Amino acid sequence: MVSKILTSVIMVLHNLSRLIFSPYTAMRKIVQESDYGQVGVIFGLVYLYFLYANIIRERTLHPFIISKSALTSFTVFLVTFFLVTSFFYIVGKMLSLKNLKYRKLVFSFAYSVFPALLWFIATSTLYFLLPPPRTISIPGKMFALVFSTYSISLFLWRFILLYLSVRFSLKTTFFKTIAIIALFFIWFIPYSFVMYQLKIFRIPFI
């Protein structure tokens, strides 16, 4: 049991490093994965982030407050993950795509969570270390520049992984992949707005 978990952790770290330096090659391999322990490790990291974020937000280690809020956020994350992957699976079925497997979407989209996870970890940590309001001094402007560059880089990386996830999971052409992603945003943007209005996510965690 322990050895399997360690193997999954090592594989997650290995695939993550490849996603950073060679996302195209890495995603082609990831959609062929069958070790669901890797998905469990990634989801576990997401849950740990929600615990961490609530400690920062509530400024308390009270187990009930933290665990209750984190569990709610994590549940919404799982529901969103299921809706997103199911959407692409249904679209694939409607297009009668060959070799369509839901497993491929689960693995590719699980790994695609990493850019968002890294961004949220950074913002939560900076909120604790450098709480607002922040000054417009030279150090303040330098901080804003560095953080903006970091955010844009992760956003571009996230979009690349989204494209590759759809492309390799559904095995679609470039233009068909872009069309499917555009169709996805038609419902996902209103969904994100509802989550924002409900004060669940200010920025969708997916």
Image (cartoon, helix red, strand yellow):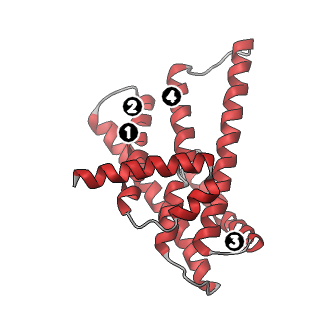
User: What's the amino acid at mark 1?
Assistant: Leu
Cα distance, mark 1 to mark 3?
34 Å
Cα distance, mark 1 to mark 4?
13 Å
Cα distance, mark 2 to mark 4?
11 Å
Closest to the observer, 192 or 182: 182
For label 4, the residue is 125
Disc 2 packing (10 Å; few <14; some 14–19; many ≥20): some
Residue at image position (50%, 77%) is 101
Cα distance, mark 2 to mark 1?
6 Å
Indicate which disc, 2 or 3, sits on the residue closer to the N terminus. Answer: 2
Q: Nearer the viewer, mark 2 or mark 3?
A: 3
Q: Nearer the viewer, mark 2 or mark 4?
A: 4
Closest to the observer, 113 or 206: 113
For label 3, the residue is 180
Quadrant (top left/top right/bottom left/bottom right) for the N terminus: bottom left
Disc 3 packing (10 Å; few <14; some 14–19; many ≥20): some
User: What's the amino acid at mark 3?
Assistant: Ile
Task: Say if 98 sits above or below 122 in the image.
Answer: below
Which mark is drawn over residue 51?
1
Residue at image position (56%, 32%) is 123
Indicate which disc, 1 or 3, sits on the residue closer to the N terminus. Answer: 1
For label 2, the residue is 55
Indicate which disc, 2 or 4, sits on the residue closer to the N terminus. Answer: 2
Q: Is residue 48 visible?
A: yes
- Left or right: 115 in relation to 160: left
Give coordinates of residue 100: x percent, y percent.
54, 80
